Image (tube, rainbow, N blue to C red):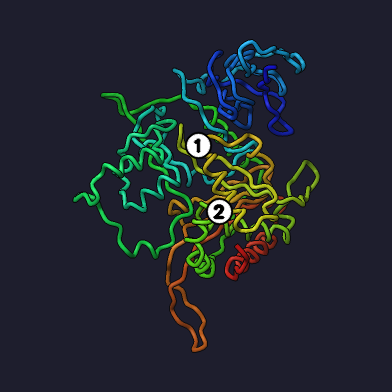
């Protein structure tokens, strides 16, 4: 029997969704979990995967139609499979989108919107301001996302950024795959004269926890000094949710300087073996998520939400991690680590790496973007020292992570004050002053500061 492809339920307040684009046509072969179509609601844009291997048998809801949650959109199965529609019959209504949002020509499949809830901030810090053109196959890797695995191999072989960007990729959207890179390295001279070498001192400098995505490439028409492009559903969702958050919450931000020297010592001791055993990097973000998860247990107002005339205190701790994406356009997703307080550092590091990778490659499931109780945004991985992120509604606080770097610091020794080189960075907490008072926010941040600076937790 054929499998139904349904309009999924994506949050308590979402009753309907619009089919934006079918990525497959009837008769096309599909693999289980391969993306079939792109849908959009007033809060999120998501790609719906195939429920099983087979072919797309039919399309029941066409592009541009809006239908209720639970409506059957199509069927996947084998040729000749019996099709039974078990869902209540829904009457599609043609959506009336803003003309400015509609593309002039077929657009590439987009990614999931930043969150089912109104989006968190740091878009100004984490996402480039310019607007990309549609991704084309076989484009250089500088036009798209470089996976952490490919970037790590490139770094190990001291492959400069300009040379990596020149490799023609065979992956989705022209991305460079591991196979592409290894094939290039095999035929590449070992020490080309033009290859810049990495200074030995660079290894001692704390590195960003996330690879910096390449700048957006934009081509202007001959003789034109401006370029117009329709606003996509994902960008429209970001715009609306940012404004809604600012209009809803009374934003205030407090800043704390953090000494990461103790954490840096743990990272230096274990990062090589951790990479070998777990296959992911031991990043600062994992330590931050671990510390935040424990501190939220002691500060219930930071893990609460406002619901009309009630304060809702939440026992469960679900931490969202903001992830900047580039393909097919700049944006931000916030996948959620559920029950983060129950995980050790290893589990958090694996979860963060997995969610970030699947977000950037558009493999994240819609339900993995919902239900966060607190969000961490890390534009510091791009070099920003201070950030004032926008709260991810209906949460009441969001942590902004500034760049982490080696700096001089006055420390106390047995002989008195001395100047030492420490690993330092700034953290900011944007909070909703309707519920969270300044003393409550600062108490949470003081606890977080102490937890990070004296961190001695197990891996």
Residue 38 in sight: yes
Instruction: Determine the image quadrant of residue 428.
Output: bottom right
Reading the image, the residue beneath label 2 is: 400
Check the image and name the residue furthest to the bottom.
Answer: 415
Q: Residue at x 47, y 20 (%)?
A: 103
| Furthest residue in direction right, as rendered | 310
Q: Position of residue 404 (x, y in %)?
A: 47, 61
Depth check: give the residue in front, 408 or 111: 111
Q: Nearer the viewer, residue 383 or 276?
A: 276
Drawn side of residue 424 relative to residue 226, left or right: right
Task: Write the residue at 56% across / 28% down.
Answer: 34
Q: Quadrant of the N terminus?
A: top right
The answer to whether residue 383 is above or below residue 30 is below
Most foreground residue, 307 or 40: 40
x and y percentages locating residue 75 in the rendered image: 64, 17
What is the quadrant of residue 228 in the picture? top left
**Residue 283 in view here:** no
Instruction: Tell me which numbered mark, 1 or 2, is placed earlier along the sequence.
Output: 1
Q: CA distance from mark 1 to mark 2?
A: 24 Å
Q: Residue furthest left?
A: 193
The total of numbered circles placed on residues is 2
Dot 1: few (<14), some (14–19), or many (≥20) neighbours within 10 Å? Answer: some
Determine whether the residue tagged by mark 1 lies in a helix, strand or loop.
loop
Residue 143 located left or right of residue 433: left
Q: Residue at x 64, y 13 (%)?
A: 60
Would you say 409 lies left or right of 297 here? left
Residue at image mark 1 = 361
Residue 160 image point, x, y percent:
30, 49
Quarter residue 188 falls in: top left
Q: x%, y% of residue 262?
A: 53, 70
Write the residue at 63% across / 32% down.
43
């Amino acid at each position: 029997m054929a499998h139904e492809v349904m309009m999924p339920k994506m949050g308590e307040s979402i009753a309907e969704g619009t089919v934006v684009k079918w990525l497959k046509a009837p008769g096309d072969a599909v693999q289980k979990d391969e993306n079939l179509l792109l849908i959009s609601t007033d809060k999120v844009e998501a790609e719906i995967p195939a429920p099983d291997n087979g072919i797309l048998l039919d399309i029941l809801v066409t592009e541009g139609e809006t239908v209720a949650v639970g409506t059957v959109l199509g069927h996947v199965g084998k040729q000749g499979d019996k099709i039974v529609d078990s869902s209540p019959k829904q009457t599609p209504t043609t959506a009336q989108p803003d003309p400015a949002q509609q593309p002039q020509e077929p657009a590439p499949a987009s990614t999931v919107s930043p969150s089912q809830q109104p989006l968190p901030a740091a878009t100004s810090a984490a996402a480039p301001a310019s607007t990309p053109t549609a991704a084309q196959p076989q484009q250089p890797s500088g036009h798209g996302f470089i996976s952490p695995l490919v970037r790590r191999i490139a770094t190990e072989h001291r492959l400069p950024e300009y040379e990596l960007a020149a490799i023609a990729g065979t992956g989705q959207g022209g991305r460079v795959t591991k196979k592409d890179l290894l094939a290039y390295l095999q035929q590449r001279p070992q020490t080309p004269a033009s290859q810049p070498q990495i200074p030995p001192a660079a290894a001692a400098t704390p590195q960003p926890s996330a690879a910096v995505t390449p700048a957006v490439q934009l081509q202007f028409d001959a003789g034109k000094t401006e370029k117009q492009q329709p606003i996509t559903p994902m960008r429209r969702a970001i715009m609306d949710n940012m404004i809604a958050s600012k209009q809803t919450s009374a934003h205030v931000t407090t800043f704390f300087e953090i000494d990461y020297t103790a954490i840096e010592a743990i990272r230096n001791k274990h990062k090589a073996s951790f990479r070998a055993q777990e296959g992911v990097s031991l990043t600062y973000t994992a330590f931050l998520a671990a510390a935040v998860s424990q501190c939220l247990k002691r500060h219930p107002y930071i893990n609460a939400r406002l619901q009309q005339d009630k304060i809702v205190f939440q026992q469960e701790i679900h931490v969202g991690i903001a992830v900047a994406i580039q393909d097919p356009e700049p944006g931000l997703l916030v996948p959620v680590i559920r029950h983060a307080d129950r995980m050790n550092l290893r589990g958090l590091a694996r979860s963060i790496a997995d969610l970030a990778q699947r977000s950037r490659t558009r493999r994240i499931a819609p339900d993995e973007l919902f239900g966060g109780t607190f969000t961490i945004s890390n534009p510091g991985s791009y070099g920003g020292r201070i950030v004032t992120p926008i709260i991810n509604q209906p949460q009441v606080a969001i942590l902004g992570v500034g760049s982490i770097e080696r700096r001089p610091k006055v420390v106390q020794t047995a002989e008195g004050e001395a100047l030492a080189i420490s690993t330092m960075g700034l953290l900011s907490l944007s909070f909703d002053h309707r519920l969270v008072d300044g003393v409550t926010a600062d108490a949470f941040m003081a606890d977080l500061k102490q937890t990070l600076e004296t961190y001695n937790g197990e891996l």
